[in-house]
Amino acid sequence: MTGPAELAILGVGQTPYRRRHEGSTPELVYGAVRAALDHSGLEHRDIDLVIGGFAPDALAGENCPDKRFLPAAGAVGKWSMRINTGGTTGIAAAYAAMDLLEAGRGDAALVVGVERMAQARSVPAVFNSIFDPIYERDTGLSTVSMGALRATRMMQSWGYTAELWARVAERNFAHAASNPLAHIRTAYSVGDVLTSRMLAWPIRQLDACPISEGVCAVVIARTSAAARQRGRPLARVRGRATVTDTYNMGDRIGRREGDLVELLTLRMAAQRALGQAGLASAADADVVEIHAPFDHAETMAYAPLRFCAAADGPALVESGFGHRDGGGPVINPSGGPMAANPVGATALIRLAECALQVMGAAGERQVPGAATAVATGQGGSTQFSTCTVLSGS
């Protein structure tokens, strides 16, 4: 089986991310796919595989939406499938395509991450259904209260405060102001975050992501095939790993090998992916896109990505870490999931944004000289984690 360094991202296409899109799902998919193909220099006839990522049907209010969006992506007559792994759906679809390409099933693949959650009657009700029906669901858990449980544990263990997390949010919103695709483009301040509506203590509205819709498409190819695209920039896959943990959150609290907030799966995925790429830490990259729908969740990823020890996270935030002028890697130059969180696409967007950065094609949000980038994926009740390292051609 060939190694991950033999794969590259050739093209990226995205719709704007909004609370609600008026266009149909096939229309949105076709637009993103066309943009990705144009960016890559390939045509539909050059694509061997089409992999679609779509989170639970209930969010779209439609049974088996892949029946409509996969044909719009050009899947007719090609090897195709739909992937759903919750928050990591988009990157899981990309990894499925990479695995098939490495196995010799083709030279080029098209990956599409789709989200239409505005069509759901109640997004919180859908998310509540992911929890264990006997021990967890009756407590009224949602993605917000699940986050609040983690945040309070981080406060107790490592000394985080609402003010520190508001600084993380402020930086992400500042970056998002330069991203024309972002759902939220307002540069909210620390004060705005701390006075926004309380959702579940200590999480306020601006500590959390919006409910977003949109489509992201990525063209991935074996480097032997990508070589035919001479003169076009590539984003080479230097390392990647995915790790899954136990589903029940209670089983991870106080666990010897890694507490719930220590993100064992991301620590393991990062160790493998960074090792493949020859990096000691994600701090060695120029850009890091962290899949964190909450500001506290971003800081939860700092230790697994080897930015610092978990207890030193608050001091790292105080140092101004992650800003464009912070002296280290730029964190979430797109604004990250706090600025747009179309669940079925979010993890793929992290990969796409990193690819654009190392290809020098990120527009207003481009980090000058970005040569290496790290993208994470996070899903479920944090039991799924991925880490991908990309570099420019």
Image (cartoon, grey):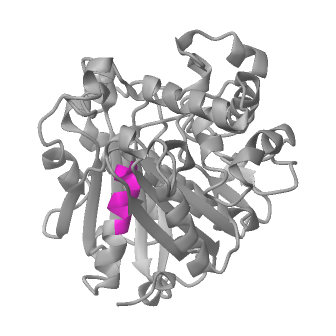
Q: Does the magenta-highlighted stretch encompass residue 135?
A: no
Residue 374: give x, y in percent of width and height: 61, 62
Number of callouts: 0
**Residue 171: image location, x then y, percent:** 74, 35
Measured as percent of width and height from the top left, residue 301 is found at 60, 49
Q: Tell me if residue 367 comes above or below residue 59 in the rendering.
A: below
Give the magenta part as a residue range: 88-95
The answer to whether any part of residue 327 appears in the image is yes
Q: Is residue 51 left or right of residue 42?
A: left
- Give the vertical position of 342 relative to 148 (above or below): below
Query: Would residue 344 appear left or right of 361 to someone viewing this image?
Result: left
Quarter containing the N terminus: bottom left
The answer to whether residue 37 is seen in the rendering is no
Residue nearest the observer in this picture, 250 or 102 = 250
Q: Residue at x 75, y 52 (%)?
A: 330
Q: Nearer the viewer, residue 285 or 80?
A: 285
Q: Quadrant of the C terminus?
A: bottom right
Q: Residue at x 61, y 57 (%)?
A: 304
Q: Residue at x 27, y 34 (%)?
A: 130
Asked whether, in this view, residue 358 is left or right of residue 87, the answer is right
Q: Looking at the picture, does residue 304 appear above or below residue 170?
A: below
Q: Is residue 158 above or below residue 357?
A: above
Q: Dominant secondary structure of the magenta stretch? A: helix
